[in-house]
Amino acid sequence: MSNIAVKEKENNNIENMIYEIRGVQVMLSSDVAKLYQVETRRINEVIKRNIKRFPDTFCFQLTEVEFYNLRSQFAISSESNHGGVRYLPYVLTEQGIMMLSGLLKSDIAVKVNVQIIDAFVK
């Protein structure tokens, strides 16, 4: 498979992780964590420790209703993907993901960040 085909496949997978909530495009912190190859709690820690860098236009926590509606879009209960959470998940906008990647400071975060931004643009 060519590099172009691989990149398109990666971007399509990322595009499937983008949802519209409150009229903005966002990604679940758990999906971002998978892409960055870190635990979701690591993403949540970075957000909480740097909360001033994440205004509501960059990141927000879902309400119970929003989370329920989002889960219903998965067609199954998604216990393995997004279920079984103790806290309502955070979602990040494109700007929030850019801020996050700068705070994580890993090579994977930089590489994946470019792919995520490309997917948001599409």
Image: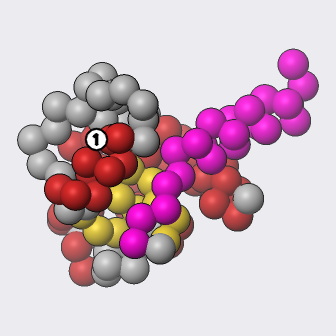
- In the image: residue 82, left or right of residue 34: left
* 78 up-or-down from 107: above or below: above
Residue 41, horizontal then vertical, whole percent = 21, 43
Give the quadrant of residue 80. top left
Give the residue at x 16% y 38%. Answer: 85
Please state, as top left, top right, bottom left or bottom right, where the N terminus lies in the image.
top right
Residue 12, horizontal then vertical, whole percent = 69, 40
Q: Circle 1: is it few (<14), some (14-19), or many (20+) Cα within 10 Å?
A: some
Residue 95, horizontal then vertical, whole percent = 50, 72
Give the residue at x 73% y 59%. Answer: 122
The residue stretch that appears in magenta: 1-22
- In the image: residue 99, left or right of residue 91: right
Residue at the left extreme, as displayed:
86
Give the residue at x 62% y 47%. Answer: 15
Residue 29 seen in the current view: no
Residue 61 seen in the current view: yes
- In the image: residue 87, left or right of residue 14: left
Give the residue at x 52% y 45%. Answer: 17
Colouring of the image: secondary structure
Residue 16 is covered by the magenta coloring: yes
The residue type indicated by label 1 comes to Thr
Residue 110, horizontal then vertical, whole percent = 57, 52
- In the image: residue 27, left or right of residue 41: right
Secondary structure state at the residue bearing disc 1: helix
Which residue in the structure is indicated by mark 1?
40
* 3 up-or-down from 66: above or below: above
Q: Nearer the viewer, residue 19 or 6?
A: 19
